[in-house]
Amino acid sequence: NAGVTQTPKFQVLKTGQSMTLQCAQDMNHNSMYWYRQDPGMGLRLIYYSASEGTTDKGEVPNGYNVSRLNKREFSLRLESAAPSQTSVYFCASSGRGASNQPQHFGDGTRLSIL
Amino acid sequence: AQSVSQHNHHVILSEAASLELGCNYSYGGTVNLFWYVQYPGQHLQLLLKYFSGDPLVKGIKGFEAEFIKSKFSFNLRKPSVQWSDTAEYFCAVMPWGGSYIPTFGRGTSLIVHP
């Protein structure tokens, strides 16, 4: 019963470094999402993948790239990290093709960029 | 595009007090509505959801919400809060059909004093 698993849980980077945040779900969900959460800003969608093989930009995609590796995995990459990307990142997934399906969230990755 | 407004950003209550958190959305069509809770240091979890039928929905831990279509509102209530309800609460809206991307409110931080 893992649900949505994110790695790593914590990371500190220097400005300009790159890294990939990993996300995997074991619920056979079609849709997967990446959010960032900042104080007072709620959740902001970075990228999403409605189904395997498709990805689309969300509200705040600049500075990020994603890969939907297969149905289970959806990774988020920071090519050149900036202090403004310090945040908590959540991956989520939701069930097959229905707007009444709630999202299931991972435990988050707390990322600090110095 | 839809939007979600949570009017109360910070709420402080004593144990046993009643709770009502406001959520209003703007969207002309049919929507699905969700409330999520995020306990300190944890990920978002689904509290309750409304798809259709009885506009009064009951969720986990004694929470309920009422959908008032004419007011575009989906307020969260609990008759008697506990210290363990201290958390951040997010309202989310997802239009029927379409891209299955929910819109989240900015959240309400609830602190319950013992």
Image: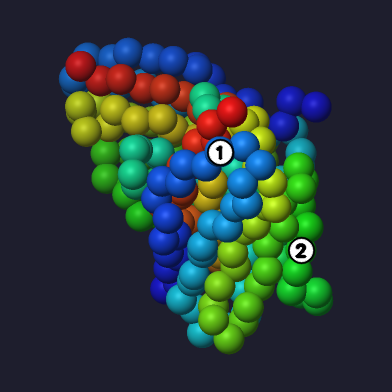
Task: Give left or right: position of B18 versus A36.
Answer: right
- Is A22 placed above or below B103 here? above
- Write down the chain letter for disc 1: B
Determine whether, in the image, residue A57 is placed left or right of residue A6.
left
Of the two numbered discs 1 and 2 on the same chain, state the one appearing first in sequence: 1
Query: Which residue appears at 42% of the width and 55% of the height?
Result: B8
Between the C-alphas of marks 1 and 2, the distance is 25 Å
Q: Residue at x 54, y 81 (%)?
A: B71
Question: Residue A58 in the image: x percent, y percent?
Answer: 40, 54
User: Does A12 appear above or below A3?
Assistant: above
In the image shown, does A48 or B47 lie closer to the viewer? B47
Which quarter of the rendered picture does the C terminus of chain B lie within?
Answer: top right
The answer as to whether the residues below labels 1 and 2 share one chain is yes
Q: Amino acid at mark 2?
A: Val
Front-most of residues B100 and B26: B26
Is residue A24 visible to the viewer in this orientation of the structure?
no
Query: Which residue shows up at 45% across the image and 65% down it?
Result: B4
> Which residue is identified by label 2?
B57
